[in-house]
Amino acid sequence: MRFHTLVLRNLSRRLSRTALTLIALSVAVASVVALRGIAKGFTHSFADIYRSHAVDVVVSRQGTADRLSSSVGEESVQAIASVGGVSRTAGVLLETMSLEERQVFGIPTMGIARESWLRDDYQWIETVEEVPANAKQLSLGSNLAQRVGLRAGDETLIFEEPFVVAGVFESRSVWENGSMIMPLDQLQLLTDRAGQVTYINVVLEASLDSDQADEIVASIESIDGRLHALPTEEFVGSDTRMKLASAMAWMTSVIALVIGAIGTLNTMMTSVLERTREIGVLRAVGWPKRRVVRMILAESLCLSLLATVIGSLLAYLTCVGLSRHPAASGVLVPSIDTLTVIEGALLAILIGLAGAIFPALRAASVPPTRALGAAD
């Protein structure tokens, strides 16, 4: 009998036990892949907010722990625009609103100046030709509009005040597709933040190199010591929400991995104890200790690889199902890429081998005479 055939036969002899171990490992892998995919999806969607507008630098308030809750004076928008090498700027006020009559809460709402170039970067699916001058207005992302059942020209209430839906837009960012846009002055008045924005988007001239861009960042911060300018990728990567999502994903995954490792250890240890006589026969016919260890580890490795396939598929189906749920539409954007699957596979192999190493060493240490005597 060949070595790999013996390994497969050993796994199939106790199908129920093997299946239970496979389930534990698969759930562990699915947890790692799904949670990491969701965390990456949040980061990618957040970054797309700026990439879709070709933003090179994001300016927020210095010393703010959560940069999305920072407060920058609106006058800084024009001051930054006058810096050499800056192509254009736009201030954005970010708040959270609710459409209470539609039972939808915690909607990201962006205040953007009516004449801002940012508005031109959106694809407008529906618009109202003319909104009454005294009417309060807002625009809805495509996912949000579908979720709340509103179209351009409809009315809705915010803080019990009527608002006209001036348009429905679509963005490359799924996060923005689940948000609202209001005129900047209107959102400032509504939230009692007159003359303030949360951050300032800065687009640099295309001909600049990285060294020149760094000089412009320094020039922006020299305007006011309270300004903190960061390249877009660095701004996204250092955001508190993104760090928290990644940390929570890993912490939850570790718990699942520990459970998977314990399940593997239990299965492999029980298997070794039940096969004491068989292992003794193999040692008696000339199998060296290292080959016995290889056999036990190979069995665990097969389980880990199969768990990677099942767990990755389970993670993908779970994420797709959750992302299509109305409550998660425009919020949950999983990104299960090749690297995420590889991370899950490596961790599955690691916990599989970790759970099998002790049983493997124990099996190899049993003398042939003792093993054969166990049958008597």
Image (cartoon, rainbow, N blue to C red):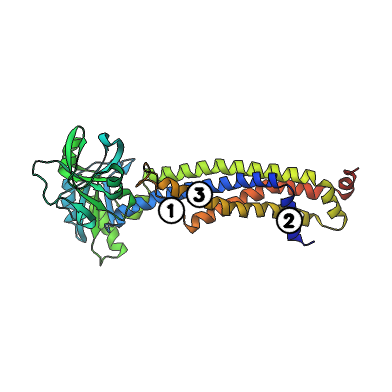
- Residue 114 spot, x, y in % from top left: 15, 49
Out of 58 and 327, give the one closest to the viewer.
327
> How many labels sit on residues?
3
Q: Is residue 24 left or right of residue 8?
A: left
Q: Amino acid at mark 1?
A: Ser
Residue 335's mark? 1
Q: Residue at x 73, y 60 (%)?
A: 4
Badge 3: residue crowd in 10 Å (few <14, some 14–19, many ≥20): many
**C-alpha separation, residue under disc 2 versus residue under disc 3:** 28 Å
Residue 180 on image: x %, y %: 25, 45
Q: Which mark is residue 7?
A: 2
Residue at 25 percent across and 65 percent down: it is 206
Measuring from the top left, give residue 101's x and y in whole percent. 25, 34
Name the quadrant containing residue 165.
top left
Mark positioned earlier in the residue sequence (3 or 1): 3
Residue marked by disc 3: 315
Quadrant position of the C terminus in the picture: top right
**In front: label 3 or label 1:** 3
Q: CA distance from mark 3 to mark 1?
A: 11 Å
Give the residue type that dot 3 points to: Ala
| Label 2 environment density (alpha carbons within 10 Å; few <14, some 14–19, many ≥20) | some
